[in-house]
Amino acid sequence: MKFTVLSLFPGILRGFFDDSIMSKAVRRGLVDYELVNIRDYAYDRHRVCDDTPYGGGAGMVLKPEPLIRALDAVGGAGKRVVFPTPSGRLFTQDVARELAGEDELIFICGRYEGIDQRVIDLYVDDEISIGDYVISSGEISTLVMVDAIYRLLDGVITRESLEEESFTQPLLEYPHYTRPEEFRGLRVPEILLGGHHANIEAWRLRKRVEKTLLNRPDLLNTGGMDEEIRRVRDELRGTSEG
């Protein structure tokens, strides 16, 4: 899969692709990437990429000419183009899975007040928000999405790890422990030390449901639950109510 990212500040992005699991995926040929500096497509002497908004108002807006030249240079008209924006649809694990099925994704990193609407009308397939808040860097929101997407590609991480993560079912993840067995008076739960796999799985499921009820109860009010999850949920709700 290839990630092509258009940005005024590509240096913010480079370290992510050059380190950790992503760098291994790139070396193994599972991921390719291209970082495009939008300023390279601003042909005036000062490489200006923004201007004041029509109709007045605070801030600046990214101009259409450099952005569209950059999009044309990377073949944006025939590829899936994503614009991270607070006014987009919410990014979820299901959206990450959907985007992971593409051969290439092009991301436009917004800045200031956003980008000229005509770029969106002509090229953007998906306006996506990473949450109900506003940040100043389209690069950061792009990296959030890229990180969620690329790890779903075959061969990047193990299938077993993916299956037990938060949001793979309508559940959050269970707590994890490693050595030492005791730290500052807190011990690893005995059940994890016994090697009884069925008991461990039952404990982990219960902890997942507990955590979901505490932090994201909305997830347990939707469909997609199997009977065992529903049973544990109802048992825990009954315990807390009693």
Image (cartoon, rainbow, N blue to C red):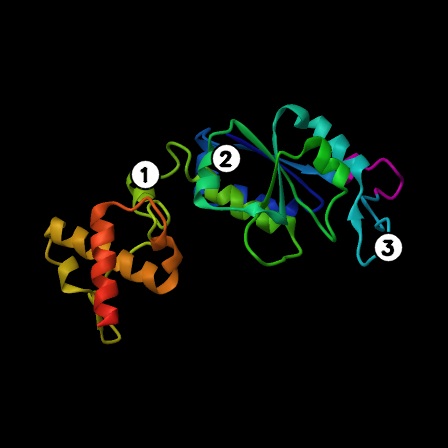
Distance from label 3 to label 1 (Cα)? 51 Å
**Number of callouts in the render?**
3
The residue carrying mark 1 is 158
Residue 45 covered by magenta stretch:
yes
- Above or below 108: residue 87: below
Q: Is residue 15 visible?
A: no
Rendered location of residue 51, percent (x, y)? 84, 48
User: What's the amino acid at mark 1?
Assistant: Thr
The residue nearer to you, when weighing 222 against 10, is: 222
x and y, in percent, of residue 194 in the image: 10, 57
**Amino acid type of the residue that numbered disc 2 sits on in the rendered structure:** Leu
Do tag 2 and tag 1 residues touch (Cβ < 8 Å)?
no
Q: Residues within 10 Å of mark 2 (few under 14, many from 20)?
A: many
Q: Residue furthest right?
A: 45
- Residue with the mark numbered 2: 99
Q: CA distance from mark 2 to mark 1?
A: 19 Å
